Amino acid sequence: MNAEPIKVLVVEDDPFLMKVAGLTLEDKGYHVERAVTGKEAIVAIKKNGYKLVLLDLIMPEMDGFEVLHELKKQKNKVPIVVFSNLSQEEDKKEALSLGAKDYFVKSDITLDELADIVQKYTKNN
């Protein structure tokens, strides 16, 4: 009996990174949906039952901090892992204070490590 794949939303405006991150996670058996803007992410999160959201911070229309703030205001419980190029400690603290479960700098991790992070946050939710 096959279980349904775990649904993950990747919110990223860089087309290349979106593609490689999505393909990496799909190769690991995840069902990956994609959003390019913060506004798209909010709409998708309201409609779909994701086990995890990978969220970039710098995006058009609505940045990741605004997405986190909006989800916190709505008391949305979907786990969010920030995946950003912002490496300042203040950015990390702000994202975590707004409800992110974890924070990773894109350039500091490999795609395999990204898949391990997703597994960590989806295996028991």
Image: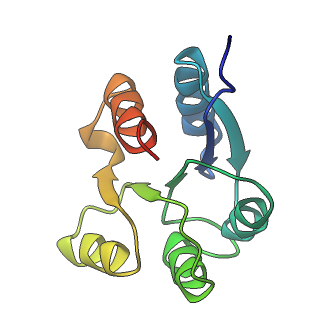
Find the residue positioned furthest to the left. 89
Residue 93 percent location from the top left of the image:
25, 76
Q: Is residue 91 left or right of residue 55?
A: left
| Quadrant of the image occupied by residue 7 | top right
Q: Image height check: is 79 above or below 63?
A: above
Q: Image height check: is 46 above or below 70?
A: above
Q: Residue at x 65, y 22 (%)?
A: 3
Q: Residue at x 65, y 27 (%)?
A: 5
Residue 10 percent location from the top left of the image:
60, 46
Q: Nearer the viewer, residue 81 or 38?
A: 81
Q: Residue at x 70, y 54 (%)?
A: 36
Q: Is residue 91 left or right of residue 100?
A: left
Q: Nearer the viewer, residue 29 or 107?
A: 29
Q: Residue at x 39, y 67 (%)?
A: 100
Q: Nearer the viewer, residue 81 or 76?
A: 76
Q: Nearer the viewer, residue 42 or 78?
A: 78
Residue 108 percent location from the top left of the image:
24, 41
Residue 48 percent location from the top left of the image:
76, 54
Find the residue positioned furthest to the front. 1
Q: Is residue 33 left or right of residue 63?
A: right
Q: Look at the image and tell me in which quarter the N terminus lies.
A: top right
Find the residue positioned furthest to the bottom. 73
The image shows a total of numbered marks equal to: 0
Q: Image height check: is 39 above or below 12?
A: below
| Quadrant of the image occupied by residue 124 | top left
Find the residue positioned furthest to the top. 1
